[in-house]
Amino acid sequence: MSHEDGRICDLLVIGGGASGMTCAIAFARECKETGVSADIVILEKNDRIGKKVLATGNGRCNLGNLDMEMSHFHSHRRDFPKSVLSKIPQQETLSFLSEIGIVTVSEGKKLFPMSKTSSSVVDAYRYALDEYGITVVPDAEVTAVRKENVFTVMCTGGKCFSARKLVIASGGACAPILGTTGDGYRWLSELGHRVYAPKPSIVQLVTDNHVTKALAGLKLDADLSLLADGIVVANHYGEVLFTSFGLSGPAVFQVSGEVGRRTKKGRLSIPMKVSLRIFDESQLLSVHEELLKRKESMADRPMEQLLLSILPAKIGLQILKSSLERPLSVPISTLTDSDIRKIENTMRAWDFEVIGTQSLEYAQTTIGGADCEEFSEETLESLRIPGLYCCGEVLDVDGDCGGYNLQWAFSSGILVGRSVADAFTREKGKN
Ligand SMILES: Cc1cc2nc3c(=O)[nH]c(=O)nc-3n(C[C@H](O)[C@H](O)[C@H](O)COP(=O)(O)OP(=O)(O)OC[C@H]3O[C@@H](n4cnc5c(N)ncnc54)[C@H](O)[C@@H]3O)c2cc1C
């Protein structure tokens, strides 16, 4: 369908991602319930909808989390996510998903579709969009947005669409390979909205890499603390992966937002370090005993064998190199009490100086975006441009790793869909 013939659609959604598809379906349902017909169009830059959803949760789609502590959501307007999520709480998003055919199960606290495949989530959305007669225009890359009497939206190739209500659901600026290149920020700025500069979150950390490079590809479970100017600002227990540029893995992703937030134009505004505790105190007691034993039983062996089987070989070697200031060719018999203390201290707090995060290209979510203060927390309608709404990652809200970003996309998408439907049916009633 082309709108070049001058037809004005009732709702135009830019972005066929998690929040845009949710919003369009929520709107269509409300209209159906009130018996009002509506012409709804989604413009999607990619050749198909939901490409990013397909990539979520390593293809398993971690679509929510039973731990709904508000500290998992971040925004320059601290209370804004809470306000939206209290209007459309998790239970309501799960009902919405179930009604379009997505049954969820929990794995620990994380929620997944029962199929554990993200493609089944995208399929369910595709069928629902079809069922409600929502027009999806793929390969429609929006280049500009204007507001006069109605909204006019220009696409590459000269296509042009007009609408009474416009939703910008074009996502953030991370993972541009999946279509999200921060375009929405530009249109919103041009329309007079304030936009916080995008920064990466849920992303790898770049650290002083002389140790991580030597260990690239190896993983270990650790209690990770992130310190800013010596003060712990985040802590998470989980897997840490060493890479040629620094640190990756679930525990690192979980704290990475705190680094992103302290970064300006790619540089840290405060010294930061990651500290890994690889053994707790009771485990360290047995390590202590074992090292004393080895001083006798392995007396003539070289020091580089001291942590044999206590840690993976390469990691053990790096712990020794970080702790002792002498060649590891010396015999274990030379081990002193002070050496043992130093080794144990490294296992308690193995420090890596943080240089920054990897770029937006590698991130799973975007810190920053359209300032929430300029949107109604009741409806998510722009307080500057009547009839314009935003949902999902384009707004300045980001969640921790663990399903919080899709939760935000669903909740904000439903709220916008319902709010637009409310306004639309009221206006229709007047005419
Ligand atoms: C690899 C990866 C894994 C992730 N895993 C998880 C996870 O397991 N759990 C979780 O909660 N979150 C996860 N996320 C984050 C989550 O996917 C996003 O926060 C969420 O999809 C945001 O929804 P959205 O609708 O705002 O944007 P998106 O889903 O990104 O959708 C925006 C859409 O707008 C389109 N678009 C952009 N610009 C234009 C334009 N100019 N014209 C037309 N269309 C345009 C894009 O192509 C895209 O389809 C992951 C992200 C990545 C990159």
Image: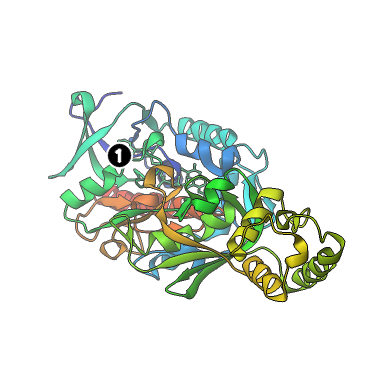
Q: Residue 237, located in which quarter of the rendered image?
A: bottom right
Which of these two is toward me, 362 or 410? 362
User: Position of 350 compared to 105: left or right?
Assistant: left
Q: Residue at x 46, y 75 (%)?
A: 230
Q: Is residue 185 above or below residue 101?
A: below
Q: Is residue 97 above or below residue 208?
A: above
The image position of residue 106, as x and y in percent, is 68, 52
Q: Residue 377, located in which quarter of the rendered image?
A: bottom left
The image position of residue 210, as x and y in percent, is 50, 52
Using the rendered image of the protein, determine whether residue 219 is visible from the camera's viewpoint: yes
Q: Residue at x 47, y 65 (%)?
A: 273
Count of labels shown? 1
Residue at the right extreme, as displayed: 297
Ligand 1 quadrant assignment: top left
Residue type marked 1: Leu
User: Position of 101 compared to 192: left or right?
Assistant: right
Residue identifier under label 1:
12
User: Position of 367 compared to 250: left or right?
Assistant: left
- SS type, badge 1: strand
Q: Residue at x 50, y 44 (%)?
A: 244
Q: Is disc 1's CB within 8 Å of ligand 1?
A: no
Which of these two is toward me, 428 or 86? 86
Which of these two is toward me, 279 or 70? 279
Q: Residues within 10 Å of mark 1 (few under 14, many from 20)?
A: many
The image position of residue 384, as x and y in percent, is 19, 59
Q: Is residue 235 above or below residue 146?
A: below
The image position of residue 245, as x and y in percent, is 47, 47
Q: Residue at x 46, y 38 (%)?
A: 52
Which of these two is toward me, 208 or 3? 208
Using the rendered image of the protein, determine whether residue 431 is visible from the camera's viewpoint: no
Check the picture and name the quadrant holding the N terminus: top left
